[in-house]
Image (cartoon, rainbow, N blue to C red):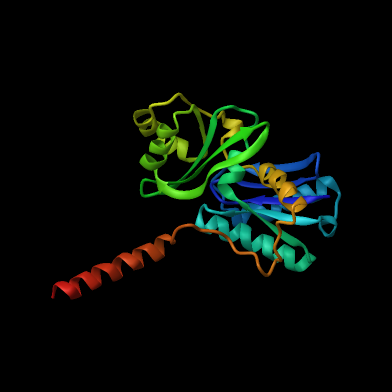
Amino acid sequence: MKILALDTSGLVASVAIVTEDKLLAEYTVNNKKTHSQTLLPMLDEIVKILEIDLADIDAIAVAAGPGSFTGLRIGSSTAKGLGLALNKTIINIPTVDALGFNLYGTDKLICPIMDARRNQVYTGLYEYKENVYQVVESQKAVEIDEIADEINKLGRSVIFLGDGVEVYKEKLSNLLMVPYSFAPLHLSKQRAACVGALGVLYFSKGLVVTAEEHEPTYLRLSQAERELEEKEHAKNQKAVSN
């Protein structure tokens, strides 16, 4: 089995090809170039190095959201386009689940946090039970205070990772009442290898969709949609007051 994996859900662009027991290749860039500039050249480079034909892959795993609206659209459209062209199924991997999958074997809670702006994060809670990755709290968009409060109530040590750490590290230190730590830099951001590894598990369980069915998961309205909603709300409030 060969799975092509894509993750453009955040600042990082990452492409990988994995099998059931091997990471064949991974190309990850965390730089200022847009994913639309980097993703396809990265994929082309991996294919050339491995000397494989994309027609030989079994499925395409993609970080399906939440995350950056622009980034998700790029990853989603690339996965959908390849799926349609190659007649391959798509494996929708929850972004936060894949981010947490960077860590393995710890007895601590795993809490990925992606900066969602406006004092919010995309987050969830995960753990290992008998070396099996488990979802404690499914991915969601909440204020940083809310996830910190949940962790405090659980009363367990926690490891944080994700681009939200850089934004909320100081605030977390003031909010948390349990032991906490932060993942090292090589494990702290999205990796297509994690998307691919989860993709192998999903594929074995038949958790796939057709390319036509694939859609990203946003969890929140886009900034433009939120601003329009706020304008409409203000307009309605003014009309009521008049």
Taking the image as shown, residue 237 lies to the left or right of residue 40, namely left
Give the image location of residue 102, x and y in percent.
62, 36
Q: Is residue 237 visible?
A: yes
Give the image location of residue 161, x and y in percent.
52, 35
- Please name whichever residue, 52 or 79, is drawn nearer the observer in this view of the structure: 79
Taking the image as shown, residue 24 lies to the left or right of residue 78, namely right
Residue at 58%, 49% (x, y): give it. Answer: 95
Residue at 63%, 63% (x, y): give it. Answer: 77
Q: How many marks?
A: 0
- Please name whichever residue, 174 or 126, is drawn nearer the observer in this view of the structure: 126
Residue at 74%, 56% (x, y): give it. Answer: 206
- Please name whichever residue, 12 or 139, is drawn nearer the observer in this view of the structure: 139
Position of the C terminus, as image quadrant, is bottom left
- Location of residue 12 by image quarter: top right
Query: In this rendering, is residue 140 above or below 104?
Result: below
Farthest left residue?
242
Farthest top residue?
179
Taking the image as shown, residue 84 lies to the left or right of residue 189, namely right
Residue at 62%, 33% (x, y): give it. Answer: 128
Q: Is residue 44 visible?
A: no
Give the image location of residue 152, x and y in percent.
40, 32
